[in-house]
Image: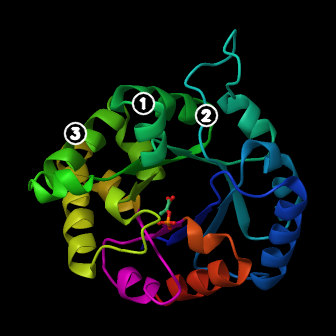
């Protein structure tokens, strides 16, 4: 049985003070919680503060991105080792905003996945089609390419331990979430491909989150789907109470 994982992607929001207040409050709300993995992804500047506030709570900390390089003359970049050192244990990779706004390719995402695993970080690998691709009937083909190329060269054991976030791009920040039928089809398809490409144990172990306008009132219908193993939440994670309600919703699994 896969434990659902619910992650808050704060994007470029919250100062260190705001991060501290949020993680302290969430920590007291989720005290003693089990049966759901809780992750908060602050901006780089608040990683250390958030990680210290999350100590002795069920909250794990993620970075929202990282460099594929180990170290060197890469002004403005942050390495896997630095993220780990700041207290993160997860890292979001290949978010559609990184792909669209910063030109990240599947090949670069794949290099980052390998670098994250080498540093013992759990990658949360984001995949998902644009509206144009969905309307052209290319959703599953796009997912195949992103999953195959993003996870190239990984062992079955590595795939079993990572998290994929299916995030249809047209549902991110738009208030328009995928219907349970659309999410079900995509998640089921990804799991089938993982089974074909990496084997039964990898497909059974890998958690596949849904992301795209997840809210307290739609998490129930999504988490009820057998291949939806949690949520990656943007806008609705910025308020601690609505993120807490989503965590509680995911517990219904
Ligand atoms: C995201 O940024 O990963 C996301 C899913 O955002 P939102 O929940 O705001 O759609």
Q: Quadrant of the N terminus?
A: bottom left
The range drawn in magenta is 209-233
Q: Where is residue 39 in the image (x, y as percent from the top left)?
A: 64, 63
Give the numbered dot on residue 103: 1
Dot 1 lies on which element?
Answer: loop
CA separation, marks 2 and 1? 14 Å
Q: Residue 184's quadrant in the figure?
A: bottom left
Q: Tell me if mark 2 has few (under 14), some (14-19) or many (20+) residues whose alpha carbon lies within 10 angstroms of its own.
A: many
Q: Where is residue 253 in the image (x, y as percent from the top left)?
A: 45, 86
Residue appearing at x 67%, y 51% in the figure: 12
Magenta span includes 96: no
Give the residue number, with chain letter if any, for mark 3: 145
Residue appearing at x 59%, y 87% in the figure: 248
Count of residue discs: 3
Residue appearing at x 84%, y 81% in the figure: 28
Q: In this view, does 103 lie above or below 134?
A: above
Residue appearing at x 82%, y 61% in the figure: 19
User: Is residue 206 visible from the viewing direction of this image?
Assistant: no
Nearest-to-viewer mark from 1 and 3: 1
């Amino acid at each position: 049985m896969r434990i659902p994982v619910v992650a808050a992607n704060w994007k470029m929001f919250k100062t260190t003070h705001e991060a501290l207040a949020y993680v302290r409050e969430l920590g007291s709300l989720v005290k003693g919680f089990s049966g759901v993995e809780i992750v908060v992804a602050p901006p780089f500047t608040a990683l250390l503060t958030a990680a210290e506030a999350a100590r002795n709570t069920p909250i794990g900390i993620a970075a929202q991105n990282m460099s594929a390089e180990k170290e060197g003359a890469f002004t403005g970049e942050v390495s896997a080792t630095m993220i780990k050192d700041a207290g993160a244990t997860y890292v979001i990779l290949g978010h559609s905003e990184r792909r669209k706004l910063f030109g990240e390719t599947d090949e670069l995402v794949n290099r980052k996945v390998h670098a994250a695993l080498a540093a013992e970080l759990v990658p949360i690998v984001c995949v998902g089609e644009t509206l144009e691709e969905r309307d052209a009937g290319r959703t599953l083909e796009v997912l195949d390419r992103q999953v195959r190329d993003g996870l190239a060269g990984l062992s079955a054991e590595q795939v079993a331990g990572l998290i994929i976030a299916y995030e249809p791009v047209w549902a991110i920040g738009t208030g328009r979430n995928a219907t349970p039928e659309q999410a079900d089809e995509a998640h089921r398809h990804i799991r089938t491909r993982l089974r074909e490409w990496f084997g039964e144990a990898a497909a059974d172990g890998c958690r596949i989150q849904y992301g795209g306008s997840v809210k307290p009132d739609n998490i129930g219908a999504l988490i009820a789907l057998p291949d939806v193993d949690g949520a990656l939440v943007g806008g609705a994670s910025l308020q601690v109470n609505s993120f807490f309600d989503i965590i509680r919703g995911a517990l219904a699994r």
